[in-house]
Amino acid sequence: MFSHRLNIVIVLLILGFASLSAQSVDVKVGEETIKITPMGRFYFDGATYLEDETDLSNGVALTDVRLGLKAKYKSFDVKVDIGFAGGKVGYKDIFLQYNLNKTSYVRGGHFAEPFGIDHMESSANIKFITANASSFAFSPGRKLGVEYIGWNKYMWVGIGAFADGDSMNNSIEGDDGYAATGRVVFNPLQQEGKIFHIGLAGSYRKADANGFDADGVQKPKTIGYGSSLITNVEKRKFINASIANADYQAKYAVELIGAYGPVHLQAEYFHSNVERKDDLPAYKASGAYAQIGFLAIGGNYTYSASWARMGTPKPKSLEFALRYNYTDLDNAHSGIKGGRMSDWSFAGNYYLNKYVMFRLDYSNVALGRNNPLAAGENINAIQARVQVVF
C-alpha cells in the first residue's frame, strides 16, 4: 500500500513540475534574489532478448524517475537531484558550488568523480540507452567529495578528493575508504563540426569499509567490478569480480573525442590494478570501447567546453551510432575469474525537442566461459526508450 501511494505521489510531483515547463523563478529574500529552476526526468524502457538460452527479463520498466531543483545566488550554485526509480529513494547530485570565475569553480557534496566520459555525462545525453560495460565496470560512481574544475580554449582540468562509497548512508562500520581522482584534457579544437579532444584520468582509492566480525575485528575489505547486460530492464551482473583482502586500487583511463561535420568518434581504454593484503597476488583488469555517430538530420556536432564532452544535438535531430566494447575481468595471475563480455551495439536517436527524446538500440553480446551468468552465450537484445527531461 505504501509503495502504491508513493508511486501516486511521484506521478503527481512529475506532472506538477512539468507544468512549470522548467521555467526559472526569481525568489526575493530581502534585497537579494535567488534564481530557482525545477528539474526532473523519467525514462520508459522496454527490452526483449532473442535466441537466449538463459531466462532473461523481457519486459518494460520505468527505469529512472528524478525530481530536483537548481538554485543560483550570486557566485553560488546549488543542485539537489533525488531519484525514485524502483520505488526507492536514491541520492544523485547534491552539492554546493562556488564559481571562482566564468571558467572555474570549486564544488562540495555528492557527485560523480572526474573519471570516465559516459560516467561523467548525464544518462540523458549519452549516445546509447546505457553506458558501455567498461564504463559500468571501472567508473567509480557518485561519492561525497570536494573538487576543483577549470578550463580554457585549450585544456580542461578536474581534481578532487572523495570519501567512502557508503558515506551517504553511513551504514557499514569500519575504517572508511577514500580516493583522489583527477582528469586532464587537451582540446585545442572546440568548434562546431571540428572537435579534437584527448584526455587522461586517474584514480587512487583505499578499499571501503566492510564492517566488523563477531569478535569486533574489522573484516577483510573487498573491491568489486561488474556490469549488467547493458540494459536497465535486466539488472543482474553478467560479469562480476570480487577481490578479497583488498588494500587499494589504482586505475587510469585514456580517452579520445573527435568530430568532423556530422560525424563523431569517441573511445576510451580503462585499466585497473588492485593490490591485496596477506601477500596475495594483485588483480588486474581492463576494458575498452569505441563508438562512431552520424547526424543524419541536425547539422554538425558541437562540444561542451565546461565538461569536456560532446554537446547535445539540437531539437528535430536524427542520430545513428555504432559502438564496440570489450571488458575483461578474468585475471590468471590472481586466480580471479570475473568473466569477459563484448558487444556490438547500434543506436537510433530522435531528439523531438529539448525535453523529449526517442531511442532504439540493438546489441549483440558475447559472454566468456567464466561468466557468472549465461557463460559462453551469445545474446541479441532490442531496447527502446521514451525519455522526458526538464
Image (spheres, rainbow, N blue to C red):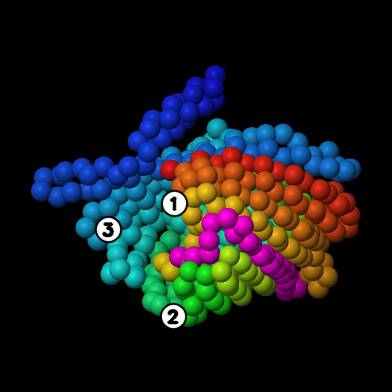
- The secondary structure type at the circle numbered 3 is strand
Q: Residue at x 30, y 68 (%)?
A: 102
Q: Is residue 8 above or below residue 64?
A: above
Q: Nearer the viewer, mark 1 or mark 2?
A: 2
Amino acid type at mark 1:
Asp
From this viewpoint, which residue is outermost toward the top? 1
Magenta residues? 276-304
> Main SS of the magenta segment?
strand
Which of the image's four quarters has the C terminus?
top left
User: Which of the marked residues, 1 or 3, is nearer the chain's N terminus?
Assistant: 3
User: Which of the marked residues, 1 or 2, is nearer the chain's N terminus?
Assistant: 1
Amino acid type at mark 2:
Tyr
Residue 64 appears in the picture as rendered: no
* Mark 1 crowd level (few <14, some 14–19, many ≥20, 10 Å Cα): many
Q: CA distance from mark 1 to mark 2?
A: 28 Å
- The secondary structure type at the circle numbered 1 is strand
Label 2, on which residue? 154
Q: Is residue 196 above or below residue 350?
A: below
Q: Residue at x 65, y 56 (%)?
A: 320
Q: Residue 300 colored magenta?
A: yes
Q: Nearer the viewer, mark 3 or mark 2?
A: 2
Label 1, on which residue? 93
Q: Quadrant of residue 131?
A: bottom right
What percent of the width, then of the height, locates residue 6? 49, 26
User: Which of the marked residues, 3 or 2, is nearer the chain's N terminus?
Assistant: 3
